[in-house]
Image (cartoon, rainbow, N blue to C red):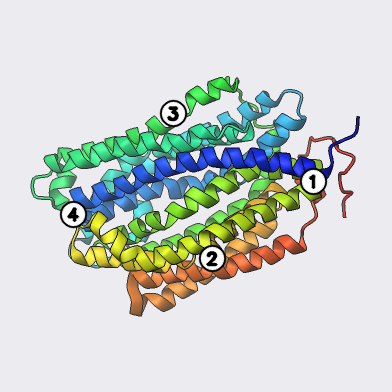
Amino acid sequence: MTDPEPEQESAAVAVRIGRRSTVMAAGTVASRATGFLRVLALGYALGFNRVSDAYNLANTLPNIVYELVLGGVVSATLVPLFVGLFEEDDDPWRGVAAVTWLVLAVTAGLSALFFLAAPLLSAPYAALNHTASADVQHDLTVAFMRFFAPQVVLLAGMAVGSAILNARRSFAAPMFAPVLNNLVVIAAILAAPHFISDGGLKSLHLGAGLVVLGLGTTVGYLAQLIGLVPSLRSIGARLRPVWAPHHPAVRGAARLSTWTFGFVIANQIAYLVVVALANKRSGELSSYQAAFQFFQLPHAVIAVSVTGALLPELSVAAARGDLHTFNHLFFRGLRIIAVLLVPAAIITAVFAHPFLRPLIAHGQLSDNSLDTTTSALSAFALGLPGFSAFILCTRALQARRDTRRVFYLYVLENGLNVALALAFYPTMRIRGLAYAYAVAYTVSAAVAYVVVRRTGHVSEASRLPFAAPTSPTRRPPD
């Protein structure tokens, strides 16, 4: 019996990816739609002002701490790592459990440190806020952060659980679980104004509204994590507590993490600069983040679904040394992004104002906040194809364990973002920050494409350190 022809095998893989992408797209639509309602609820209940700025900043900082210390490593390495374990290891679940429990232990400690160091962590992001309400806003941000501290370990649990499911080709739960999060948070946001006497910073800081918003938001993360459990059980996940920091899977993740940690730092430096600029004026940070969420919708529905379904297959092709399948999958993903996201970017840029304004012009949201948000969305939209293409290119490199080149690409992108943000902000403010983001990703995507093309072989480094050759087509080391 002969092996199937490469074209037939690639076609079969393409069919599987198409089915998975459809499931992921459906989940993404549901999660992003409820995320959209979450933004509307925040604008309706609180408006875009110093209160919402404090809430948004505090809710972002657990993600920053998690990403800075561990999250980038988890998101960049675990799916390829777990795919390799399931492909080639005799006892894959022990390696998966070793990585999982180490990640949870580290992030549990981070949650405790986050709670204690909240005032220090929030200070740099408010460095350019010299308004009369700056001190009260800082106090409110710190109070929110302490409610949000458990999110660090919850984020780790969600990331590892999603990586396990994706490695086992189970994509539905990670895409639909955020719906639970959003619904819980929407309920908390809509309930909070009933506990705020005058809608001001002081009354929220000292009242039950803080508890409702703070606790409700963190419970939303817990609901999202719990939403993964049935699917983990259905794939037969065996995650009994294991403390094995010297397991080859842990060492493999650690080796891959050096360059990954570098690009995570680059990302956070750029984010610090952008947030500090956006936080100079009341409500503009909330407008920037709202516009970014709307910008992410077409990317999430199309590019995330495609890239998420491709990554396990790219990782398998890299582990087997199957250059033909790897390149076929990569260019297929790139074509889908180009065909669908270029029109989406044009439509979003042109119709951002007439489409978005009627949807969010309710409750406490001012006309100025509406205009700021829609103009930022139009600017963001110009970078939609470049942003999605950049993510696909870096995922392709990560599937080959080429985190060094990914690091250099992120340094380029973040360097451009910071330089352009500083140049554009004085005259264009929030819209300038969005333009900076769009241009930085578009230029970096072009460079990333060239890098992937010029390093198109599947290198020996793409193999796991404990993996044995499994395919006669494996390319010898260069």
Estimate the x, y position of residue 284 in percent, counting from the top left: 29, 64
In the rendered image, the vertical position of residue 375 relative to residue 120, given as above or below: below
User: Which of the 4 quarters of the picture holds residue 74?
Assistant: top right
Query: What residue sits right under mark 4 in the picture?
Result: 362
Q: Earlier in the sequence, mark 4 or mark 3?
A: 3
Q: How many numbered discs, if any?
A: 4
**Label 1 amino acid?**
Glu
Which tag is nearer the camera, tag 2 or tag 1?
1
Query: What residue sits right under mark 3 in the picture?
Result: 227
What is the C-alpha distance between the residues marked 2 and 3? Answer: 33 Å
Estimate the x, y position of residue 342 in percent, counting from the top left: 52, 64
Is residue 124 found left or right of 153 in the rendered image?
A: left
Q: Are marks 4 and 3 in contact (CB under 8 Å)?
A: no
- Who's the residue at 52% across and 36% down the image? 106
Badge 4 crowding class, 10 Å Cα cut-off, few under 14, some 14 to 19, many 20 or more, is: some
What is the C-alpha distance between the residues marked 4 and 3? Answer: 32 Å
Query: What residue sits right under mark 2 in the picture?
Result: 441
Query: What residue sits right under mark 1 in the picture?
Result: 7
Q: Are marks 2 and 1 in contact (CB under 8 Å)?
A: no
**Label 2 amino acid?**
Tyr
Badge 1 crowding class, 10 Å Cα cut-off, few under 14, some 14 to 19, many 20 or more, is: few
Name the element at disc 2. Answer: helix
What is the C-alpha distance between the residues marked 4 and 2? Answer: 33 Å
**Label 3 amino acid?**
Gly
Badge 2 crowding class, 10 Å Cα cut-off, few under 14, some 14 to 19, many 20 or more, is: many
